[in-house]
Amino acid sequence: MNYQEVLDEIYKEVLPFINEGKQADYIPALANINPDQIGMCLQTLDGKQYLVGDVEPRFSIQSISKVFSLAMALGVQGDKLWSRMGKEPSGAAFNSLIQLEIEKGKPRNPFINSGAIVMADILLSHFGCSKGNIDSALHNFLSFVHSISGCDTIDYNNEVAISERDNSYLNAAIVNLLKYHKNINNDIEDVLRFYFMTCSIEMNCKELSSAFVKFANHKKTFSYNGIVLTSSQVKRINAIMQTCGFYDEAGEFSYLVGLPGKSGVGGGIVAIYPQRYAVTVWSPRLNEKGNSVVGIKALELLTTRTKESIF
Ligand code: GLN
């Protein structure tokens, strides 16, 4: 397959859609970036990268970080994790409260905010954090990201994390509801701070593809900064990406693209083709579900053109 030719064609085809949608502004720091950017990187299992557009600028990975959190939480807890959250699609917005109230503080899945906030709590406990000091969790999370992406200059963006904290009315409600139902063990301020820091990590299309190709390559040993997963666990993370990676647009993404993936409100989407490649698209303008307009379009074109999807 000539992926470079396919990517070049896709780039031309999605350009007319670059003005559709609106970049996230509920986190004010995210509103400051230039929305007129499109980058795409496909990395095959052998490490070869195919690139087009704005593949160098780093962007806020936001909810894409939830996949790293799941890999770490599953690594440290194994199946015990599922006593604190489910693995069913939510069919609701990423920051919805309604289901969480009805289901008595047990998040539907790890890829909505409530699930990721519980995983943040699990990691704070695992890394021995004490009230007011989350340094060891921050250090270990970043080291895991460095290790899985092969790039140790990746970092948090404190300004984005603080900007999110200052406007975190819904996430604050979620963590309070979780705490009320005894699904949070640590201090809620610490949990939120850690969660926002993980969302604020900045990576570019190349670095994300390099990290996610490890999920595509589930038959190979998965061991990064002390987090070890079996090939079955990696495969199951991919299964959850398939069913829950796009909130209330998971069905539509599955229908249009047919690959497991995960989006974030920074405009990034990563998708994987098991045993073949990982692909990242970034373009900041989002649809009303919080997913990149150009990202979905580009991935739809990719699997249609190549006639390659998991179905
Ligand atoms: N940090 C963001 C939030 O919790 C992540 C949301 C997202 O990318 N969907 O609101």
Image (spheres, rainbow, N blue to C red):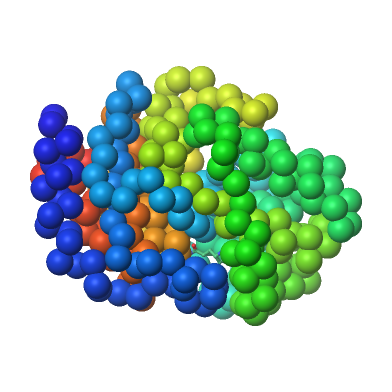
> Where on the picture, by quarter, is residue 223?
top right
Q: Residue at x 39, y 61 (%)?
A: 267
Q: Residue at x 85, y 53 (%)?
A: 133
- The image shows a total of numbered marks equal to 0
**Which one is nearer the viewer's eye here, 98 or 130?**
130
**Which one is nearer the viewer's eye here, 306 or 80?**
306
Q: Residue at x 65, y 28 (%)?
A: 225
- Left or right of 64 in this view: 183: right
- Left or right of 247 in this view: 105: right
Q: Assign the C terminus to one quadrant of the image.
A: top left
- Left or right of 210 in this view: 182: right
Pinpoint residue 224: horizontal percent, then vertical percent.
59, 28
Pinpoint residue 190: horizontal percent, then vertical percent.
78, 60
**Which one is nearer the viewer's eye here, 87 or 53?**
53
Pinpoint residue 13: horizontal percent, then vertical percent.
12, 57
Q: Assign the N terminus to one quadrant of the image.
A: top left
Pinpoint residue 227: horizontal percent, then vertical percent.
64, 30
The answer to whether residue 253 shows anywhere in this view is no
Q: Residue at x 73, y 54 (%)?
A: 121
> Where on the picture, by quarter, is residue 297?
bottom left
